[in-house]
Image (cartoon, rainbow, N blue to C red):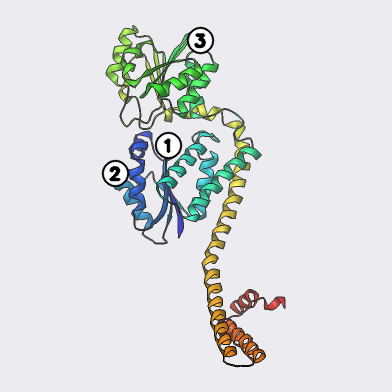
Amino acid sequence: MTLLALGINHKTAPVSLRERVTFSPDTLGDALQSLHQQPLVQGGVVLSTCNRTELYLSVEQDDNALQQLVNWLCQYHKLSLDDLKKSLYWHQGIDAVNHLMRVSCGLDSLVLGEPQILGQVKKAFAESQERHKLNTELERLFHKSFSVAKRVRTETDIGSSAVSVAFAACSLARQIFESMSEVNVLLVGAGETIELVARYLREHQVKKMVIANRTRERAQVLADEVQAEAITLPEIDERLYKADIIISSTASPLPIIGKGMVERSLKARRNQPMLFIDIAVPRDIEPEVGKLSNVYLYTVDDLHAIIEHNLSQRKAAAVQAEDIVKQESLNFMEWMRSQSAVSSIRDYRSMADNIREELVEKTLIAIQQGADVESAVNDLSRKLTNRLIHAPTKSLQKAASSGDLEQLNLLRDSLGLDQC
């Protein structure tokens, strides 16, 4: 068994490719079912966010395992290998362990140290565990990654400042509009990212905030918290013209806001500027919207510059966090290696118990048939000793006769001879 991680992220693939490889909540169950049916897969977790799609797997040790999984990913998303291979990365063994820990700690995020990713990793793990029982090693790896992320948050300043995609979106809006108290904002979606955006905007006292969601009930919960108005997605068309800033982040597989809708809104606004920030993958806003006059459209990939501005104070903490991750990865691999000995220890103990039971049974029969008890016990102990030392003795003789001093010393150490 070996651990494997493969996927694409914001560093290796543009949003146009990432949105084609994403697993939506509606399809995740089928995807996990299909993944676990692959011949070499012993367990797997699918992590799919706006910035990454990754598979974490325990697979049988086979040279073809990686290629089979890459083929599965291509076939599932109806992509050619040429579409994916330049953006795909993979890690095995300790590198896979290190990668998951870095992801969980926010060290591999678009925003260094952002805390949202840990919740997303936990959710991905829980969803996979709910549908398919994971093997011990993979389950232990995820729990270990969660504890490492907690340790990094506790022992370093990696999360000392409020830096995230949501914060970057709000920073962009504040740069374009001098006074947030004079703008109307439309938030599309009601997930975790939009919740963060709404709280940031509430702190800056925007003039009016409207939250649109597929279900009004979900939007209303957030709207009540931030003193906003809740509407449904179909109502966006008639309300869009009133919004100066539109920030969208849903799990919709198709765009929600199209070019025609924005054109009508601009006409109703008499071409007053509109800022669109689309932080969804797949995108919620048609790319053609950005070509319209008086429209400013930004995607998650456009937020890099803002995010970089807020990273300086986290870089020193990141160095310390990397050291923690490196050490914890080594500790986990040491545990993995110890697990490989468990089956051997179990087999050895079982063999010894079988020998003991066999000889005890023969001794009891002999005593019942009139044999001297003391002689029978001495015979039992002698035979038990001979049977137990037979295999080690042969190994010692073989190492000595072949002149393999390294193997001989290893056997002596294993048998505790140098401790006598």
Counting residues from the start of the chain, the first of labels 2 and 1 encountered is: 1
The residue lying toward the viewer, choosing from 246 and 323, is 246
CA distance for labels 2 and 1: 19 Å
Determine whether the residue tagged by mark 3 lies in a helix, strand or loop: helix
Among all residues in the image, which is located at the extreme right? Answer: 420
Q: Residues within 10 Å of mark 1 (few under 14, many from 20)?
A: many
In the rendered image, is residue 399 in sight? no
Find residue 1 and report its horizontal and vertical position in percent. 45, 60
Q: Which residue position holds label 2?
A: 79
Seen in the image, is 419 located left or right of residue 183? right
Q: Residues within 10 Å of mark 2 (few under 14, many from 20)?
A: some
Q: Which residue position holds label 3?
A: 181
Residue type of the residue flagged with mark 3: Ser
CA distance for labels 1 and 3: 32 Å
Determine whether the residue tagged by mark 2 lies in a helix, strand or loop: loop
Quadrant of residue 289 in the image?
top left
Counting residues from the start of the chain, the first of labels 2 and 3 encountered is: 2
Q: Which residue position holds label 1?
A: 49
Seen in the image, is 213 located left or right of residue 120? left
> Which label was assigned to residue 40?
none
Judge whether 137 appears above or below 282 on screen. below
Seen in the image, is 209 located left or right of residue 345? left
